[in-house]
Image (cartoon, grey):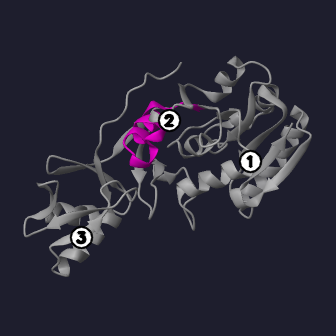
């Protein structure tokens, strides 16, 4: 089913990166500081005094609250009316808690303490950009099989006529709604969101409907259906002639990546894909119809 459309209201979200920056400015005795009130997406000038941080003529947060945020290694905090609360939710598909976790750029998604993105040496958003680049040229209709925080769908929408993105977990959608970097997911006219299971939803599309598929599934232990030959045959069916599917597999140098990749590549060939091209920079392969 398609999700109903409503645009999130503007909000302030901070992490330890912004909090530490503001605390350093306070220690330096500065009356103002440049910082970001949306996890690094934009920057603006804020006022500093003995009470705390001021923005738009009002107290944003007291210093004790900034210190608490600075001390949270894995939390992102929504700020409202002089108070803050950590952005947390519940993943219905895994029956585990989920949260946004901060990086020096765009945040990632964490479920039950495990990160759902690459983030070592690269931000989650830039990792998504690498996946979309690996499938280039990205034009026409694009299927994004696992929305997550929407970074791949947003990147694909820059060149595609339409991006259909599927997310199984309402809790993950709520994390995206709370993330300043994900707002184009809900606002871009080329993006259509579906709440459902990709292994089922893909069977509802006509033959040769998509030019490109971006397939970034959770681990095989969590989403085995998305690594199965049945799913790959459906992917081959819905791809247009000469269509391409980028399949994320994890670090090709890791023991897990080395175990998963051979079986995936064999099932892709059996499903009909004529050529499988390794894309190590994006931690996956490109399967060509």
Question: Image point 65% across, 43% down: which residue?
Answer: 216
Q: Is residue 159 left or right of residue 270?
A: left
C-alpha gap between disc 3 and disc 2? 32 Å
Q: Secondary structure at mark 2?
A: loop
Quadrant assignment for the C terminus: top right
Question: Image point 77% across, 30% down: which residue?
Answer: 235
Chief SS of the magenta region: helix
Question: Image point 7% across, 70% down: which residue?
Answer: 50
- Give percent across and percent down for residue 118: 58, 57
Can you say whether 104 is above or below 57 in the image? Answer: below
- Give percent across and percent down for residue 75: 35, 56
The residue that mark 2 highlights is 188
Q: Residues within 10 Å of mark 1 (few under 14, many from 20)?
A: some
Q: Secondary structure at mark 3?
A: strand
Tally of marks? 3
Query: What numbered label is drawn on residue 33?
Result: 3
Which is more toward the observer, 111 or 271? 271
Question: Image point 47% across, 49% down: which residue?
Answer: 109
Q: Residue furthest bottom?
A: 28
The residue that mark 1 highlights is 136
Q: Is residue 22 left or right of residue 216?
A: left
Considering only order in the chain, which callout, 3 or 1, is on the residue closer to the N terminus? 3
Q: Is residue 274 left or right of residue 73?
A: right
Range of magenta residues = 165-186
Q: Secondary structure at mark 1?
A: loop
Q: Residues within 10 Å of mark 2 (few under 14, many from 20)?
A: some
């Amino acid at each position: 089913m398609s999700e109903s459309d409503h645009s999130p209201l503007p909000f302030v979200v901070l992490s330890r990166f912004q909090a530490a920056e503001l605390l350093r400015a306070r220690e330096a005795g500065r009356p103002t500081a440049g910082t970001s009130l949306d996890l690094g997406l934009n920057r603006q000038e804020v006022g500093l005094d003995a009470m705390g941080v001021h923005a738009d003529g009002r107290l944003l947060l007291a210093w004790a609250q900034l210190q608490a945020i600075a001390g949270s290694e894995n939390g992102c905090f929504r700020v409202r009316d002089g108070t803050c609360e950590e952005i947390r939710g519940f993943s219905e598909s895994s029956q585990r808690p989920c949260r946004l976790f901060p990086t020096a750029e765009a945040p990632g998604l964490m479920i039950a303490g495990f990160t759902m993105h690459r983030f070592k040496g690269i931000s989650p958003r830039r990792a998504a950009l690498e996946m979309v680049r690996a499938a280039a040229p990205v034009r026409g209709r694009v299927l994004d099989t696992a929305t997550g925080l929407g970074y791949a769908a947003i990147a694909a929408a820059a060149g595609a006529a339409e991006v259909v993105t599927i997310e199984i977990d309402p809790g993950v959608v709520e994390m995206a709604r709370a993330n300043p970097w994900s707002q184009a997911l809900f606002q871009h006219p080329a993006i259509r969101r579906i709440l459902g299971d990709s292994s089922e939803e893909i069977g509802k599309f006509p033959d040769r409907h998509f030019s490109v598929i971006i397939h970034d599934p959770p681990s095989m232990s969590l989403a085995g259906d998305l690594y199965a030959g049945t799913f790959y045959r459906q992917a081959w069916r819905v791809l247009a002639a000469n269509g391409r599917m980028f399949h994320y597999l994890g670090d090709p140098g890791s023991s897990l990546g080395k175990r998963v990749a051979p079986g995936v590549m064999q099932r892709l060939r059996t499903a009909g894909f004529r050529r499988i091209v390794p894309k190590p920079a994006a931690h996956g392969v490109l399967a060509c119809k």
